[in-house]
């Protein structure tokens, strides 16, 4: 069955659009307002759904070929090669694709051409040619930017290796396809190829849920032919496990859908499996009926296994019925089909082994060249050894000096970085609590000497925990940075601003009395409340409660000044939030 499955899927892949080159437009002909590239893109999108229109558009573009730029000429060459392959002229198509591959065309268009060649080789069973192309395609696929082109590449690799009978590789690439597929057809193809590979590797039981999941994916995407293939694999597995009753259940439940599909190879597979299952159940008339349909070519079978199975069933029936002549004739047909199948397997294995041998030989040549290069390198090193030794001392001294300079530079940078980490809050860029305290004490000592007043503004974001809990810590961090920015915009350049707690900020204002500090706090409060918060990803009102104190009421002790501002701030919070309160003696009672 592997051969005709490969034919089904290869033909599907030829019809799938590739990334930016594909279009589903159905606009008409060459139009003065359309570029030739757009017309070619339109044709690309129609190449499988409307072949007649596709050829018409190509003919119209060819008439204007002298006006095409190089990109359009390459695109036309690709579509012309596809037109040849679609009409069955595979030799000419491969030659046209190869000319494009050997040109300087766009890399993704070249990759499309290579994939198309692999499709043709899979269809015509030119395994050596397909393996040669895949050896160049597969290393490039992970770097392809177009996701659809990458998906198609994995699909074609999986189809090709399953068709070749290299099921471990087919499984590997079907799983790559499964991981990247986004369109329904590719998702169905991925699970169908994966199940087929596991089935051929004897690593899946007929009762495995993998069969059910694969059928559900394909039927959910209306890919009934591939769903029928999966059921065929399952029925064959039931037969290999000796459970012909289950095999019959699978086949009979889907027989009407297979017959209505009109696809002869899958019908032949179902009929041959039904014949085998009925034979095992002792229902010889039913078994003979289905086997004769396949054996007599009433349903065209492109698969030697299908023919061999049907004729083996007929041989067993005739033998049991004592019809020696008919049994001998059926056995001869069985032996011929079985031999053809074994020859096909040998051909595939030989092609794969030859490709592996060529790969090993190429690697050996590369290794030999590497060894020769190493010998040349050693010779050059020996020639340069004397000069190198003469300069070694200078180089060492220079390295030591450079190392010391580098160490000194990095040491300076590290010290600077450590100082930055210690003195500044990493989130807001404001002074950390420790550095704020140190700088504020120094400022207060200076202003006390001058006899100048100092004010303190302490503010805390309202309902900040709720912002974190409901909108997330990312939004909370954004709110803290906004508060820091707004505060710095409203205060003077020499005012001291620090983040002293989670959502708590403090501003020290030298040469400023409480009344002026209150105005500053009000400006910060209003600016914060009026800011648009939508850029955080959430829309909410951000407010804060402010407490103000000064040295006239608190003295030049920083701790007392901050404590009084804190009392005023809590009065602001307790009396409604989003307001400014100035410390007075009543708060000490």
Image (cartoon, rainbow, N blue to C red):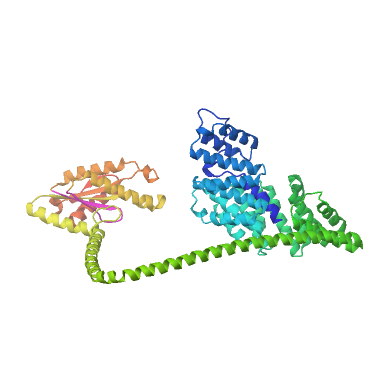
Give the percent coordinates (x, y) of residue 281.
83, 61
In the rendered image, the vertical position of residue 584 relative to residue 172, given as above or below: above
Report the residue at 27% width, 47% height from top: 485
Q: Please, which residue is most extreme toward the left here?
A: 450
Report the residue at 75% width, 57% height from top: 304
Near-viewer residue (102 or 387)? 387
Residue 188 visible, this orientation: no
Q: Is residue 279 magenta?
A: no
Q: Would you identify the image quadrant in which residue 39 lies? A: top right
Give the percent coordinates (x, y) of residue 25.
57, 35
Report the residue at 48% width, 66% height from top: 367
Near-viewer residue (46 or 442)? 46
Near-viewer residue (88 or 223)? 88
In the rendered image, the vertical position of residue 473 relative to residue 365, given as above or below: above
Q: Please, which residue is most extreme toward the right here?
A: 322
Q: Is residue 202 left or right of residue 176?
A: right
Rendered-image quadrant of the C terminus? bottom left
Give the percent coordinates (x, y) of residue 473.
38, 53
Give the percent coordinates (x, y) of residue 556.
13, 55
Q: Would you identify the image quadrant in which residue 234 lies? A: bottom right
In the rendered image, the vertical position of residue 413 relative to residue 86, given as above or below: below
Residue 157 visible, this orientation: yes
Rendered-image quadrant of the N terminus? bottom right
Count of numbered marks: 0
Majority secondary structure in the magenta region: strand
Near-viewer residue (487 or 423)? 423
Report the residue at 37% width, 69% height from top: 379
In the rendered image, the vertical position of residue 84 relative to residue 246, given as above or below: above
Q: Is residue 523 left or right of residue 339?
A: left
The residues colored magenta run 494-510
């Amino acid at each position: 069955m592997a051969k005709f499955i490969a034919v089904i899927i290869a033909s599907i892949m030829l019809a799938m659009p590739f990334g930016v080159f594909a279009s589903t437009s159905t606009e008409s002909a060459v139009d003065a307002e359309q570029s030739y590239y757009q017309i070619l893109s339109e044709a690309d999108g129609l190449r499988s759904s409307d072949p007649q229109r596709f050829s018409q558009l190509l003919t119209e573009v060819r008439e204007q070929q002298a006006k095409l730029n190089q990109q359009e000429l390459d695109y036309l060459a690709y579509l012309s090669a596809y037109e040849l392959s679609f009409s069955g002229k595979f030799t000419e198509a491969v030659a046209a694709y190869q000319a494009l591959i050997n040109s300087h065309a766009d890399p993704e268009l070249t990759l499309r051409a290579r994939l198309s060649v692999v499709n043709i080789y899979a269809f015509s069973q030119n395994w050596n040619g397909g393996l040669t192309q895949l050896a160049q395609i597969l290393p490039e696929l992970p770097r392809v930017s177009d996701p659809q082109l990458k998906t198609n590449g994995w699909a074609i690799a999986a189809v090709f290796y399953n068709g070749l009978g290299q099921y471990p590789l087919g499984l590997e690439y079907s799983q790559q396809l499964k991981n990247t597929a986004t369109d329904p057809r590719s998702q169905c193809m991925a699970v169908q190829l994966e199940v087929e590979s596991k089935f051929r590797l004897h690593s899946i039981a007929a009762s495995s849920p993998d069969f059910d999941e694969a059928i559900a994916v394909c039927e959910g995407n209306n890919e009934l032919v591939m769903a029928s293939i999966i059921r065929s694999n399952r029925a064959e597995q039931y037969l290999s496990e000796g459970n012909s009753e289950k095999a019959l259940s699978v086949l009979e439940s889907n027989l009407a859908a297979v017959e209505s599909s009109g696809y002869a190879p899958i019908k032949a597979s179902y009929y041959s499996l039904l014949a085998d299952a009925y034979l095992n159940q002792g229902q010889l008339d039913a078994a003979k009926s289905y086997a004769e349909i396949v054996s007599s070519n009433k349903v065209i079978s492109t698969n030697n296994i299908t023919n061999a199975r049907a004729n083996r069933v007929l041989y067993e029936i005739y033998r049991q019925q004592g019809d020696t002549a008919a049994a001998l004739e059926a056995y001869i047909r069985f032996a011929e089909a079985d031999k053809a199948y074994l020859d096909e397997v040998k051909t595939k294995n030989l092609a794969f082994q030859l490709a592996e041998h060529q790969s090993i030989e190429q690697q050996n040549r590369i290794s030999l060249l590497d060894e020769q290069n190493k010998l040349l390198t050693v010779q050059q090193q020996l020639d340069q050894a004397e000069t190198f030794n003469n300069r070694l001392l200078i180089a060492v001294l220079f390295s030591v000096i450079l190392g010391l300079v580098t160490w000194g530079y990095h040491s300076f940078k590290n010290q600077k970085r450590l100082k930055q980490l210690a003195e500044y809050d990493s989130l807001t860029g404001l002074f950390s609590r420790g550095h704020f305290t140190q700088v504020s004490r120094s400022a207060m000592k200076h202003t006390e000497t001058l006899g100048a007043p100092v004010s303190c503004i302490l503010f805390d974001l309202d309902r900040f925990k709720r912002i974190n809990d409901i909108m997330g810590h990312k939004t909370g961090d954004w709110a803290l940075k906004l508060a820091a920015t707004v505060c710095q915009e409203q205060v003077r350049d020499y005012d001291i601003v620090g983040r002293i707690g989670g959502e708590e900020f403090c501003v020290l204002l030298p040469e400023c009395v409480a009344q002026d500090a209150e105005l500053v706090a009000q400006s910060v409060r209003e600016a914060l409340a009026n800011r648009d918060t939508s850029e955080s990803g959430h829309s909410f009102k951000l407010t804060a409660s402010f407490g103000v104190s000064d040295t006239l009421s608190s003295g030049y002790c920083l701790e007392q000044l901050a404590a009084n501002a804190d009392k005023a701030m809590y009065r602001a919070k307790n009396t409604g939030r989003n307001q400014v309160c100035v410390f007075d003696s009543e708060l000490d009672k």
